[in-house]
Image (cartoon, rainbow, N blue to C red):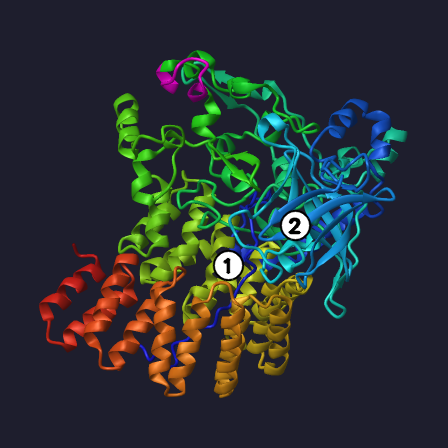
Amino acid sequence: MINIVSGISRLVVLLSLQALIACGPNDRSMSKVDKVKNLDTSTTHNQQIGQAAHKETTYVGSKFCAHCHKEETSAWQSSHHAFAMQEANEGSILGDFNQSTFTYEGITSTFYKKKGDYYVNTDGANGELKDFPIAYTFGAVPLQQYLIQSPGGRLQALSIAWDSRSKAEGGQRWFHLYPDEKISHKHSLHWSGINQNWNFMCADCHSTKLQKNYDLNTDSFKTSWSEINVACESCHGSASKHLEWAENKQLKIKNFGFPVELHSVSATNWEMDHESGIAKNKVSQKNQELQTCAQCHSRRTTFFPGAKAGSQFLDHYNPALLLPPLYHIDGQINEEVYVYGSFLQSKMYAAGVTCSNCHEPHNLQLRSSSDGVCSQCHLPEKFAQVDHHLHPVNSSGARCVNCHMPSKNYMQVDSRRDHSFRIPRPDLSDKLNTPNACLSCHQEQTNQWATDVLHRKFGAPDKSHYGEALHAGFFQAIDGEKKLSQLITDSTQPAIARATAVTLLPQYFTRHSAQLLQAIAQGNEPLLSLALAQSLDRVPAQFRPALGIPLLFERERVTRSLAANALGSLPLNNYPGPVQKQFYTALKEYTASELFNSDRPESLVNLGELHRQRGNSSQAEVFFRRAIKSAPYYVPAYVNLADLYRVEEREEEAEKLLRQGLNRAESKAAVQHSLGLSLIRQSRHSEAINFLQQAAEAQETNSRYIYVYAIALHSAKEPLQALSVLEKGLDQFPSSPDILQAIISIHRESGNLEKAKKYEVLLTGNY
């Protein structure tokens, strides 16, 4: 049995605001050994080439582009990119500022004009009504938000937005972005707080050449841009050398002076296969366009600033993978994930389709109306038929997108479609608790009804879906390791699904999984390497160097910096000099990333952990305290600092801190669990059990909290109650090894060997 007094684990957090990846066009043919030898040389060589080609390149502004590119400029001027952000004035404001009011949770906000400026009277950070001038508009259709200037160079996004749709569509009104939550001035989502801060949350994808410029010492921003909206150079890159080329077209400059060439889409690149009814791509080319679009149209954290058109995605961004709550467990969209992670799952992506095949890149509209976009590559004679879509001609159900790209509303009024282009799988919905397009319309029917209809017409699917393996791994199923391993090694499956499986595999750390993870560490698939780096801190410490050291030599900066952080607490002094050198280089990169994002509590906690690993406990405490000050609701800051106090035998201070956290945290289970352990260490067992119980019964509980609570009951001479808790926990986490082992142990102690044997069979998977 585990000693729960020393069983507390630190909540070492990585940045949680993340999204998805384009695998870069690097040469992946080198072995890891070659990379170790050539990393410094090849990186320096590439940098020298870039510096030579673009040493003096600068951003010039879209006004220069318009002289020659009138048609493209005209198209762009009507696009969402052009309206991404504007100064607040009569020409940009869409909302009703004629003394209009909106009431939310007892607070009435008033929107008005005064001397040509626009204002809102609403509750500020202290809960009191105050007049705030509107500095900028944010977006245009289907909603427009408003930015308010705050101290320290901050811009804050007001949570009351204007519905710019027509009245017939339900628009032309004020509405709150969080109508189902009670957002007071103390809430983490209040407009005045850190989670509505434009400088971090929104800015780099709404303006051109955005520089965040956060100063940790002064806790202030000096954010700048070259153009306020998403203009030409956001996608094409800095244009000064292109202007040189335009003035002298005989001048030999690569890519016409741009850092990257975005190839135009050509119908001649595709050839229709009349037997299948689907066009096939004839041209194999590096897709710089997709890499460029992904920088913003993805759910990701910016690890390293300075990304430009064509930059390697994993040199700058740490993407989120296909896990709840961002995605449903089968990869369907759930929260806002901004298209790219969905698209990477699709057969379209695998076939070579890119964004501008469907979207005109300057006005951003679809290239054709209705199903015309689909019919570019899918013969209507084969697919726009009742025999295929099973709905009346010209009905809503006959439209391609309604079955293959179901939509979901975000920000209340913004409907966005799932770009994974999937076949509906109602047969998986009950098993995986996932939605499907069939029942989104046929709400009176059941998943079984929809399954029967599709199976009668098309037959049962001939292979399992990757969602089944991810579900098994996410919920710790007994056969999870087997299913995850099969998915990871199946190169026909989407790389992003396989990478997600990699992040789940360390919880089943066996000889087999260790060998597979070692193969990934030594392999040449960037997204799988990143996934291993993201989950490396969950690998047992004694095995971590074998998996982590090869990742230090990855070309992708985000991957190697994450690996360095996961290795940071381990002694590497006995490793060869090149390994130590590369570790410290990568750790320096990781530290620079966290300092760049030190306006966020996640990074402040990570910096605290780095100091703690180095034995700088006083400096670690400073960073943990700073995180609490910047985000009083942020649970990991309390838990990690309390654990620091535990190590330093400052248990009373840990208890006091955790009690403060209970009063401030919005999700309390982790604090309750940590406080229970603290009280046990102080021999206050009856108090401790109360908090451990609250954590175990919380909505956000996990198998660990349930296990520890049951062990505490068992230690308190309550074996029957402990068994009851464990068996209920097994219903929630059907194959948790901790829970199963505890049940087996208690039954053995009680002499119930037959019952113990029953659970041993479950534990070993010998059904």
Residue occupying the point 53% across, 78% down: 657
Task: Describe the element under mark 2 as helix, strand or loop.
Answer: strand
Q: Which mark is residue 108?
A: 2
In-front residue for pair 609/31: 609
Report which quarter residue 541 is drawn in: bottom left
Whole-percent x, y for residue 360 in the image: 65, 26
For the residues bearing labels 2 and 1, Cβ distance under 8 angstroms: no
Q: Which mark is residue 598?
A: none
Quick check: can you spot residue 77? yes
Q: Which residues are magenta?
A: 387-398
Task: Describe the element under mark 1 as helix, strand or loop.
Answer: helix
What number of labels is visible?
Answer: 2
Q: Is residue 733 magenta?
A: no
521 with respect to 603 (left or right): left
- Mark 2 or mark 1, earlier in chain: 2
753 with respect to 358 (left or right): left
The residue singled out by tag 1 in the image is 533
Position of the N terminus, as image quadrant, is bottom left
Q: Is residue 396 magenta?
A: yes
Whole-percent x, y for residue 19 in the image: 55, 48
Quick check: can you spot residue 734? no
Look at label 1 and name its amino acid: Ala
Whole-percent x, y for residue 593 in the image: 65, 61
Report which quarter residue 238 is drawn in: top right
In-front residue for pair 370/482: 370
